[in-house]
Image (cartoon, rainbow, N blue to C red):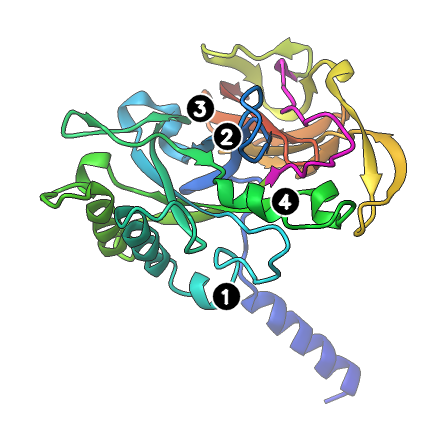
Amino acid sequence: MNRNLALAAAALATLACSPDFDPASKIDKLRVLAIQAEPPEIFPPGDPSVAHTAALTSLVLRAEDFDPAAVHTTTVVYLACVPTPGVPAPSPCVMLETLRDPTAMIGQAAAATCAGDTGASGIAFVGVEVCEGGTCGPAVAGGTPLPSPELAVTTRVSRGFDALPPGAPERILGVQAEVLAFALDATPDELVADAGTTCPIGDIAARLSELWPAREHVLATKRVVIRGPEAVDAPNQNPAIDAMVAGVTTLDPVAVTTIAGGAIPLRPDFDAARCETYTKLDAAGVPIETVREDWVFSWFSTAGEMDELHTHGATTDEWRVSGEPAGTPALVAAVVRDLRGGTAWTVHRVRVTP
C-alpha cells in the first residue's frame, strides 16, 4: 500500500475509534461547578473586628434538577488543610498519595476532630451541606442539625505569622487553605444511619467512606486566602452577577423563561464598578503593578453547547440549542471568578422552543 494511503487509513481508523466526549460546558451528571467562600479572604485570629472564618457553599447541579419531581439529594462533606506560615511541608489535601484514596482523609479528619484536634494534624473536618435542585444549605439528619461548613482559622496560623521576620513573603502574600468538598448522591440521614457513638463526625466519615465507591460522587477543591499581617490591599470581596441576558430577554431568576432555540447570545449583567483594583505581587511579595480585576465567566447548560467555556467581562457567549424537541427544558448557569479567590454564580431555568 502507498505510504500516504496507509497513513490516511490509520488516521481514519483512529478517528473512528475516538470517543465522542461531551463539551465541558455540558451538565449531564452530578457536577460541582464552583465553591464559594464568604468572605473570600479571612484573617488569622487576633483582631476581633475582622472575620476569622469563611462560610463555604457549593454550586451542585444535575441534568434532572430542572424538574422538581426528579430532584436528587446531594450531601457535601467539607474538609480543609490549613498550613502553618513558614512551614514548607506540602498540604495533605493536594498530595497525590492521599488523593488516590480520598476517603482515608475523611477518617483521618474525623479522628482528629473527635480527639479535639482543631487542625494541628494538618487536616480538619469543616462541616456538611445538603443540595437539592441547585440550591445548597444547612443539613439536618434525624431532626438534628449537622455542623454548617464554616472554615475556621486557628491561633496556630497567627503564631506562624508572628514567628516570621518582618517583610517575609508569607507575611505579605498570606497563605492558602485547601478545601476539599466530597459531594455524594446520598441524604444526610444516610450518612448518620445507625449512628450511636459519642462522636457523630466519626459516624459520618465511616458511612461516607462506605458509600463513596457505590454511589455517584464528585470531589471538588477550593483555595481560600488567609491574609498575612502585612497585606498591601484591602480584603478581597466576592463578585456578583445581577442577571443573565439571552438575546434581548433577561432570564427570570425564579420562574421558567421561554426562549427560541438556535444560536442564542448569552451575556452576564453585572456592575463593572465592583471590579476591584489590587496590587500584583511577585513571589517575594514585591509590588509589580496596580491592576483592575478581569472577571472571567464560565458557562454551563444541560442542553446544547456553549461556543466558549469562558468569557471575559461583558463579552457575549453563544449557546447553540438546535434540533431539540419542542419545549425542551434546560438549566443554564454562569459562574464568575475574579481570579483572586472570589466566586459567584447564577442559575436559570428555560424552555427552548424551535
Q: Nearer the viewer, mark 2 or mark 4?
A: 4
Report the residue marked by disc 1.
Answer: 96
Q: Are marks 3 and 2 in contact (CB under 8 Å)?
A: no
Identify the secondary structure beneath mark 1.
Answer: helix
Q: Earlier in the sequence, mark 3 or mark 4?
A: 4
Q: Which of the 4 quarters of the picture holds residue 322?
A: top right
Where does the image place residue 209, in percent across and percent down from the top left? Answer: 27, 55
Q: Is residue 272 magenta?
A: no
Report the residue marked by disc 3.
Answer: 329
Identify the secondary structure beneath mark 4.
Answer: helix
Q: Which of the 4 quarters of the picture holds residue 159?
A: top right
Specify whether 72 is left or right of 190.
right
* Residue 23 visible, this orientation: no
Report the residue marked by disc 4.
Answer: 162
Q: Nearer the viewer, mark 3 or mark 2?
A: 2
Query: How far apart are the two marked residues, 3 and 2, measured between alpha carbons?
Result: 35 Å
Q: Are marks 3 and 4 in contact (CB under 8 Å)?
A: no
Identify the secondary structure beneath mark 3.
Answer: strand
Around disc 1, counting alpha carbons within 10 Å, would you say few (fewer than 14), some (14 to 19), or many (20 or more)? few
Around disc 2, counting alpha carbons within 10 Å, would you say few (fewer than 14), some (14 to 19), or many (20 or more)? many
Query: Does residue 88 sit above or below 26 in this rendering?
Result: below
Report the residue marked by disc 2.
Answer: 54
Which region is colored magenta?
Answer: 225-245
Q: Nearer the viewer, mark 1 or mark 4?
A: 4
Q: Nearer the viewer, mark 3 or mark 4?
A: 4
